Amino acid sequence: ALVDSRAYAIFVNYCFARRHKLKTNKLAQEIHIYNANESRNRSRSIRQYIWLNVTVDKHHSCQACLVTNLEEKDMFLSFSYFKKHNPEI
């Protein structure tokens, strides 16, 4: 996983979700998405999310994660996740 201080949510790579056969849910409204360098993401928009049990150190939580193309990364954890849950890393 990668920590991204500018990310506003937790993101999971669609390849990771497919590889682990995770159940996806449809968003009520799609979200247009841009990369950190302000270029348009290859996926163009996010239409799905998953519920995922996230464990960092000894901290466990169930998180709604947006599914998109993250290239070679499996997951992006937002700074707000760490601020809220304050795990030791």
Image (spheres, helix red, strand yellow):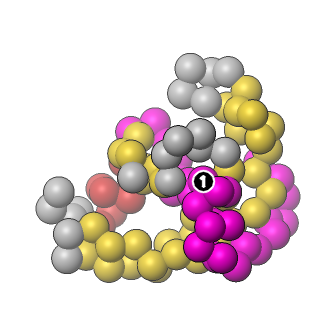
Question: Is residue 28 in sight in this rendering?
Answer: yes
Question: Residue 46 location in percent, x, y?
Answer: 76, 51
**Pointer 1: residues within 10 angstroms few (<14), some, or many (20+)?**
many
Q: Residue at position x 75%, y 63% from top?
A: 48
The residue under the point 45% across, 78% down is 53
Magenta stretch: give its range.
Answer: 5-32
Confirm whether residue 32 shows in the render.
no
Front residue of this view, candidates 19 and 78: 19
9 in the magenta segment: yes
Please state the total of marks drawn on the protein image. Answer: 1
Q: Is residue 9 left or right of residue 77?
A: right
> In percent of the image, x 40 and y 72: which residue is there?
54
Q: Is residue 57 left or right of residue 22?
A: left
Q: Is residue 30 above or below residue 53?
A: above
**Residue 49 found in image quarter:** bottom right
Residue most extreme to the left: 88
- Residue sitting at x 48%, y 54%: 75
Q: Quadrant of residue 25?
A: bottom right
Residue 22 position, x and y percent, is 64, 76
Q: Position of residue 38 (x, y in %)?
A: 62, 21
The one of 24 and 72 positioned closer to us in this rendering: 72
Q: Amino acid at mark 1?
A: Asn
Q: Which residue is mark 1?
A: 13
Residue 11 sits inside the magenta stretch: yes
